[in-house]
Image (cartoon, rainbow, N blue to C red):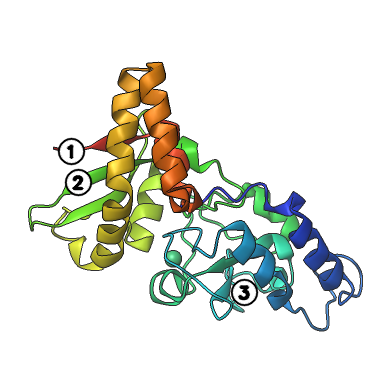
Amino acid sequence: MIDMREIYVDKLFQEALTEFNHKELDGDCTGVSECKWKVFKKAFLEFTNSKCPICEKLIDEYSHIDHYRPKDKTLYPFLECCYQNYMLMCPVCNSTYKKTDFPLYGQNRIRAKNKSELTNEKPLIANPLHDDIYELFELQFINTTKGKSILILNPRKDLDEYKKAKAEKTIEFYGIGNCDNNEKMSSCRIDLLEEHYERLLDFARLSKKCLTQKTEENKKILAGYVKDKPNIKKYGFYKFIVKNQFKIAV
Ligand SMILES: [Zn+2]
């Protein structure tokens, strides 16, 4: 998962926003005759190193712009042209998993009918554009009972009830964790998670060692590893490892 909170100040995004706003009638996201969300694709691809912000599968210009709150007529049609509601996502996250679902937390799950009511909602799906993903998730390298070696996301410890529910729901929703739970296993994205495990395990092991013994020698070894494999820094998961938010199950 990729922390996207800085994208709005990104130069490419700002340029796209200027182009986008020229198509708006009143500068807000209402009263727009035509909203071409595609103008943001380049900025998203550049910012994420062409990875899906949720699952880190590789994406390209044919990937989908997702509406975080679905623009479906029965849900949030008033957000169809709000750029804050856009994110470039892989087709699997977008069309196979997310679709037009948008679960909310709490007893009174009253859905917002306009922009001003949005602050009353408690979405159960994390949004890397606005949420602090490091507060919600940690990584775990595991071997499943079915013999698969995969990298999954787990909710962090000591979250309040809402954040815990949000982290758990997000993981289940996109099939990026909870993979040893027999009931949920079929929706887990094993192939992709196996690939992440393979690409990141050595770096995680080395980081663990260097974080336990912070010697100059170890720091040099770690820096050397990253220099030799610059692609490792293109992962959003890289930052979780650097922040020591990961576990390796033996
Ligand atoms: Zn994805």
The residue to which callout 3 is attached is 71
Contact check, label 2 and label 1, Cβ < 8 Å: yes
The residue to which callout 1 is attached is 249
Residue 75 visible here: yes
Q: Please determine whether, in this image, residue 31 is positioned above or below residue 226.
A: below
Query: Residue at the spot x=20%, y=67% of the render?
Result: 186
* Local SS, label 2: strand
| Side of 102 relative to 10 (left or right) | left
Q: CA distance from mark 3 to mark 1?
A: 41 Å
* Local SS, label 3: loop
| Side of 146 relative to 237 (left or right) | left
**Amino acid type indicated by mark 2:** Ile
Residue 184 screen position, x and y as percent: 21, 60
Tag 2: Cα neighbours inside 10 Å, few (<14), some, or many (≥20)? Answer: many
* Local SS, label 1: loop
Q: Which of the four quarters of the rendered structure image does ligand 1 lie in? A: bottom left
Query: Residue at the spot x=55%, y=47% of the render?
Result: 3
Query: Residue at the spot x=55%, y=60% of the render?
Result: 49
The residue to which callout 2 is attached is 142
Q: Please determine whether, in this image, residue 139 is positioned above or below residue 187.
A: above
Q: Nearer the viewer, residue 133 or 245?
A: 245
**Amino acid type indicated by mark 3:** Lys
Residue 84 screen position, x and y as percent: 70, 59
Residue 189 screen position, x and y as percent: 28, 65
Query: Residue at the spot x=18%, y=38% of the render?
Result: 249
